[in-house]
Amino acid sequence: MSAETGQFAADPSLPAGQGPPGVGVAVRGLGHRFGELEAIARLDLEVPAQGALGLVGPSGCGKSTLLELIAGLQQPSAGEIALGDSRDPAGRLARCAFMPQRDLLLPWLTAIDNAALALRNRGVRRAAAREQAGHLFKRFGLGGFERTRPAELSGGMRQRVAFLRTLVAGKPVLALDEPFAALDAITRAEMQAWLAAALGADPRTVVLVTHDVEEALYLSDRVAVLSARPARVVEQLSAPNPRASDRDAAVTDPAFVAVREQALAALHGGAQ
């Protein structure tokens, strides 16, 4: 897939060709409780500006909670989270685009109006928002589907609309919570390759939650394996060839397979 096809949207308020400034993520001594339930133990993580970190761990270990804390949707019980120089929840939320597991497209809106929601929420008038989002539809592989309702789109196309909606605001940090979980295996692999090309064309700082170790290693520079609840980091692994243009070749390379097996072993050990 070409860079042109995958390139993310820049913030419309910035000059053409100028993306958002790099903002990294730092997590220090993080702990979080829901009443008496300890969801996250003392946890340290770091993602450099325009780097990508994958988070994998057993079901219910607190991955999605950790992502919401990073994005500023919750305030941690202990420790500190910084996105660039911002540590308060409102500041983190202002710098972070959060995409939940479901695409959450509004069924009564067309694809272009769903994609333009981020702009509309910033006070951009409907016609201007449609125009700005519309310029990106061909680049996102959605050309000709601007007036289509979500129910008439394939799963992969719905995900692309959701990404466009998430990214059109131009925020420098992306928090992605199982973005491809609802897709079939073939479409999921295609979307992984699409996202890899997009990140190569217009890098952002990414924190990706996924149950798929292969997906995490392919899309991320580093993968943090979390333990069962309360979540702690069991192991961090460097990806052999993150976001390679040939996904199939990348995930079958012996070096990739070896790291994948190491990650799976750490995952199984941390689930005990």
Image: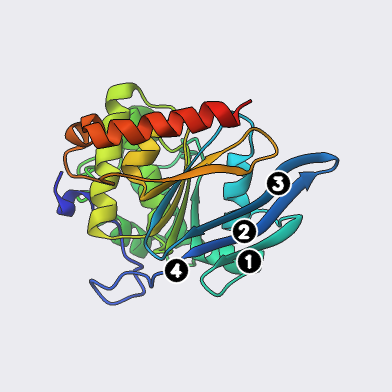
Q: Nearer the viewer, residue 135 or 108?
A: 135
Mark 3 → mark 4, Cα distance in angstroms: 25 Å
Tell whether label 3 touches label 2 (CB within 8 Å): no
Q: Is residue 120 above or below residue 262?
A: below
Mark 3 or mark 4, whichever is nearer to me: 3
Q: Earlier in the sequence, mark 3 or mark 4?
A: 4
Tell me the CA gap for discs 4 and 1.
15 Å
SS of the residue under disc 3: strand
Q: Say if mark 4 contacts mark 2, CB within 8 Å.
A: no
Find numbered disc 2 in the image and state the secondary structure of the residue it sits on: loop
User: Could you tell me if residue 136 is visible in this image?
Assistant: no
Question: At label 3, which amino acid type do we have?
Answer: Ala
The residue under the point 64% across, 52% down is 43
Distance, label 1 to label 2, CA atoms, is 6 Å
Task: Residue under label 2, please give it.
Answer: 72
User: In the drawing, does residue 268 fall left or right of residue 10?
Assistant: right
Q: Residue furthest right?
A: 36
Q: Which residue is mark 3?
A: 41
Relative vertical location of residue 267 with respect to residue 2 in this rendering, above or below: above
For marks 2 and 3, the one nearer the N-term is: 3
Q: 148 or 8, which is in the foreground?
A: 8
Q: Which residue is mark 1?
A: 90
Query: Whole-percent x and y of residue 88?
Result: 66, 68
Q: Are marks 1 and 3 in contact (CB under 8 Å)?
A: no
The residue tagged with tag 4: helix, strand or loop?
Answer: loop
**The N terminus appears in which quarter of the rendering?**
top left
Please tell me whether mark 1 or mark 3 is closer to you in this view: 3
Disc marking residue 23: 4
- The residue mark sitting in front, 4 or 1, is 4
